[in-house]
Amino acid sequence: MKLEENKKENYVESVQPPYSAQHPWLLICHGDMMRRQTFFSVSENRYYMKSIPELKEKIICAYADEWLVLESIYSYSSDCYLWNIISNDKIQLPPLPAKCNILKCLLSAPPHDPECQVIFLIKETETTSDDDDTNEDENSDGDGDENSDGDGAENDDDDEDVNLLTFYFCKPGYNKEFHKQDAQSIIGDSHLDIWTVFKKKIYMIIGCPSILMCLDPDHDSGRITATPMANRAPHLSRKYSDHPLFKDYIIQSSSNDMLLYVHLISNGREYEMPYHFRLFRFDFVRKRWIKAESIGEIAIFISFPGKAGTTCSTKGTNLNKESIYFTDGRHIYVYDLITHSISLSLPCPHVSKRKRHHMHWLTLNQ
């Protein structure tokens, strides 16, 4: 595997990136408090260094076209809003709970689209107490001699923290507050692993085996329903069963109108190196996953650990068709679905490998 490193002349500092260039952009947020941004164009093999104040101290939760959902890097802040990276417009979202952990987020469409909605999966911490002890105290005869500890102090030993998984969803710019619903009432005890937007509908993979479901938020009733789409997971070969580390993705391909399932198998030291990919498309007629032998003049772009992805037509570009571009750490891997070969490059060597950074594939449509 050959490592390629971009030369110094392949970057432009403090110059506005030409957003109309061939898709996609790899946006790397890095530096102290995420104060620096590097835009890397795969098609041009060039990167642009920026410092955008609006992205400082922010994490990108989700995006649709040029609209980003931003949250603070600080755990004590739950402020989230939509921001347009091209026009600099901002849409404030309703307040989220003060003490919560945003696990996942999706933006179904740009906010000017009537079907636009944003949905969060949030973990809330709630402290509960033993109600039975309270009821016994209220129903006692008042002498307090038999079971009293003598000082009248409350006993907090039975208090415990309970983690609640909740869906929060709204129409940005319209709803004054979020609709919310207990996630367990929708997915039961299963784990929501990955989700994506396909044709403005939300699809998610839950549980083991991986079950595909369609999530349908209803803003009139403020409720969410989930419809199973397939009762079988993609058939994965036992050939790689001795490789313990896998990563899964579901992404939409607007170029050829497919819902795709990408299964990444890792190898090497501590199983951190991408080794093999298996690709499936969903057959909505037969309601099952079909192994995709070819995707034609399409390239797939996925990133870790965000488990987000996009696709792009390779026609008229120097992008590799029938390929998967995968980011991990500071590197970009390119996997050829036909030859099963893999190459590795370091596109932006100035990004520190020791400091925290986030990488996102963006398709910016003007």
Image: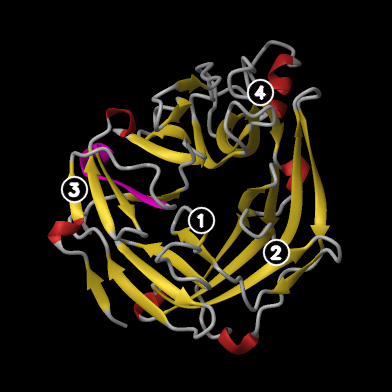
- Counting residues from the start of the chain, the first of labels 2 and 1 encountered is 2
As measured in the structure, the alpha-carbon distance from the residue carrying label 1 to the one carrying label 4 is: 59 Å
Please name which of the two marks, 1 or 4, marks the residue nearer to the observer.
1
Q: Is residue 152 left or right of residue 353?
A: right
Q: Nearer the viewer, residue 354 or 53?
A: 53
Q: Dot 2 corresponds to which residue?
A: 210
Q: Which residue is mark 3?
A: 12
In the image, is residue 33 part of the stretch drawn in magenta? yes
CB within 8 Å, label 2 to label 1 = no
Span of residues in magenta:
25-35
**Quick one: quadrant of the N terminus?**
bottom left
The answer to whether any part of residue 126 appears in the image is yes
Q: Are marks 2 and 4 in contact (CB under 8 Å)?
A: no
CA–CA distance between discs 3 and 2? Answer: 44 Å
Q: How many marks?
A: 4
Q: Amino acid at mark 1?
A: Lys
Cα–Cα gap, marks 3 and 4: 79 Å
Q: Are marks 3 and 2 in contact (CB under 8 Å)?
A: no
Residue under the image location 49 percent in, 84 percent down? 340
Viewer-nearest of labels 3 and 4? 3
Label 4 sits on residue: 146
Residue type for callout 4: Glu
- Circle 4: is it few (<14), some (14-19), or many (20+) Cα within 10 Å? few
Q: Earlier in the sequence, mark 1 or mark 4?
A: 4
Q: Which residue is mark 1?
A: 307
- Residue 32, compared with residue 288, is above or below; it is above
Which sits earlier in the primary sequence, circle 3 or circle 2? 3
- The mark lying in front, picked from 3 and 1, is 3
